[in-house]
Amino acid sequence: MSKSRTSRPRLDTPRETRRALVRRPSYNSDAFGVFAEQFARFMGTARFLLYMTLFVVVWVAWNLLAPAGLRWDDYPFIFLTLMLSLQASYAAPLILLAQNRQETRDKIINERDRQANARAHADMEYLAREVASLRMSVGEMATRDFMRSELRSLLSELDERARPEPEATLESSAEAQVTDS
């Protein structure tokens, strides 16, 4: 039953308009990209340069100093040149592939950073508006010092009202004497 389901074409995928005579080889592009990045990373190290230098020195020394029957690449070292050219012809595209993958990752990271910066900027603007509104509301509110000065002035005003005026006390005492007699 499961075989019949897999053999039928899916309805949500378009049909192939033409079939190739030879199927193209398929590969996992991510796995190949990871390999290219590892290869490029290795080629950029001092260890790789040391290995290549050692390889070339041994190659040249062997083909100059070994007995004539054991040499495989005489003086112009054409086979060594061919091998180094072949290595360079494969290395260049692999390095470019690794750089392209890194560029894609950098674009994604930059976009995320831009979005985070935009959110942070919006948050800062919101907080600035909130601080400004708080300052405005605090400016409209009475401060502790203002309240103290107002209370002091009211207290002194009440004290003045509570104290009898000297003229008023003299008049009231004179009136009291007149009424007594």
Image: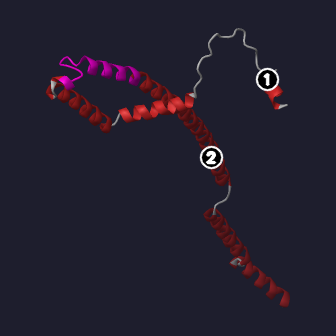
Q: Is residue 150 magenta?
A: no
- The disc at residue 153 is none
Report the magenta stretch's main SS: helix
Residue lying at the far front of the rendered structure? 69
Label count reads: 2
Locate residue 21, reporting x and y percent.
Answer: 64, 10
Q: Secondary structure at mark 2?
A: helix
Residue 66 showing in the rendered view = yes
Q: Residue at x 55, y 37 (%)?
A: 113
- Binning the other alpha carbons within 10 Å of mark 2 as few (below 14), some (14 to 19) or many (20 upward) gives few
Q: Which amino acid lies under the numbered mark 2 shown in the image of this protein?
A: Leu
Locate residue 156, reporting x and y percent.
Answer: 66, 72
Q: Are marks 2 and 1 in contact (CB under 8 Å)?
A: no
Q: Which amino acid lies under the numbered mark 1 shown in the image of this protein?
A: Ser
Left or right of 47 on screen, residue 102? right
Left or right of 66 on screen, residue 44? right
Locate residue 109, reporting x and y percent.
Answer: 54, 35
Q: Secondary structure at mark 1?
A: helix
Task: Give the quarter of the image for residue 145.
Answer: bottom right
Task: Give the quarter of the image for residue 170.
Answer: bottom right
Q: Which residues are magenta?
A: 69-91
Task: Give the quarter of the image for residue 71.
Answer: top left
Q: Residue at x 28, y 19 (%)?
A: 79
Distance between mark 2 and mark 1 Cα atoms? 60 Å
Position above or below: 91 against 170: above
- The disc at residue 127 is 2
Quadrant location, the N terminus: top right
- The disc at residue 7 is 1
Left or right of 25 on screen, residue 3? right
Quadrant location, the C terminus: bottom right
Locate residue 151, reporting x and y percent.
Answer: 67, 68
